[in-house]
Image (tube, rainbow, N blue to C red):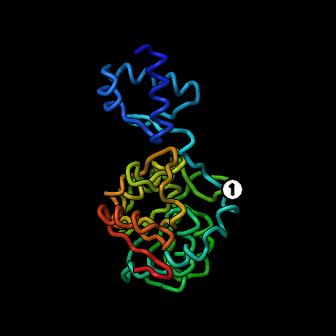
Amino acid sequence: MLPLERRNWIEAQIIKYGKVDIEELAKRLDVSTMTIRRDLAELEKLGKVIRTHGGAISPESLIRELPYSFKEGKNLEQKKAIAQRAVSLIPKNSRIILDSGTTTLELAKLLKFRSDLTVVTNDIKIAAELIESDLHVIVTGGELQNNVGALYGGPTIHFLENTHVEIFFLGANAVDLQFGVSTPTLEKSLIKQLMMNAAETTWLLADSSKFGKKAFSSICPISKLEGIITDVGLSEDERKRYEREVILHIEGSGGK
């Protein structure tokens, strides 16, 4: 097979399946993995693929970060139901991290009536929500992501590398059974990974609209989570597949 034919075939596989694996392509095409890497590099230059660790994905399969103002009122009832379940998972006198995001903000709105928790966050809107609470609130510091309200960068990294809590409530832009939990930027995924490292357990809070999607940068595989809290919008088939990998709480009418 000529290089152009091979690349066209690889592109067709990505269009069909959304992603490809270098090792698998090399076996199927009977070429070296280095040849496949060169093919993917050429396809990336043409905007046909986005290379990932061990393979590549379709640009069309990615979602991108939206401004806070757009996300604020979206799926609000689902986010409130998810937050209600999350509250029940927090023992008295716990230390927790709340990730940036609109679902974790709903959790913060419920927590502000407690006085026994230490809350760490990199979200200035969450911090503002807790201003008049009796909680011990710690803001990570760092650079502000405009239009989103999240903090990131060197000071955030340094703080999280020296932090320990019991529970981390993770927010994410996309959840996929194979690709895992992901977010649009490398900087954001690094911060979330450090938060996971700082916590004894991690719970993902994600409404059902986030499932079956991929963002640019992987945070973690599903297996690394303690559990997921989502809503009834997840199909029965999806529920069963995720339940084989992780604890899954479905909230809202008909939830369990």
Residue drawn where x is 66% and y is 67% of the image: 72
Residue under the point 50% across and 67% down: 138
- The picture places residue 187, in percent across and down from the top left corner, at 51, 46
Question: Where residue 172 sits: x, y (%)?
Answer: 50, 58
Please state, as top left, top right, bottom left or bottom right, where the N terminus lies in the image: top left
Which secondary structure lies at badge 1?
Answer: loop
Which quadrant would residue 204 be assigned to in this image?
bottom left
Quick one: label 1, few (<14), some, or many (20+) residues within 10 Å? few
Q: Badge 1 is on which residue?
A: 147
- Residue 181 at x, y = what percent? 43, 54
Look at the image and tell me in which quarter the C terminus lies: bottom left
Q: Residue 206: x, y in percent? A: 49, 65
Judged left or right of residue 109, residue 92 is left
- Report the front residue among 123 and 249: 249
Which residue sits furthest top? 2
Which amino acid, by three-letter code, is at mark 1?
A: Asn
Which residue shows up at 55% across the image and 69% down it? 103
Q: Give 229 or 202, whichever is nearer the viewer.
A: 229
Q: Can you say whether 88 is above or below 50 in the image?
A: below
Residue 5 lies, with reference to residue 112, above or below; the image says: above
Report which quarter residue 102 is drawn in: bottom right
Residue 27 seen in this snapshot: yes
Question: In the displayed structure, does residue 4 sit left or right of residue 90?
Answer: right
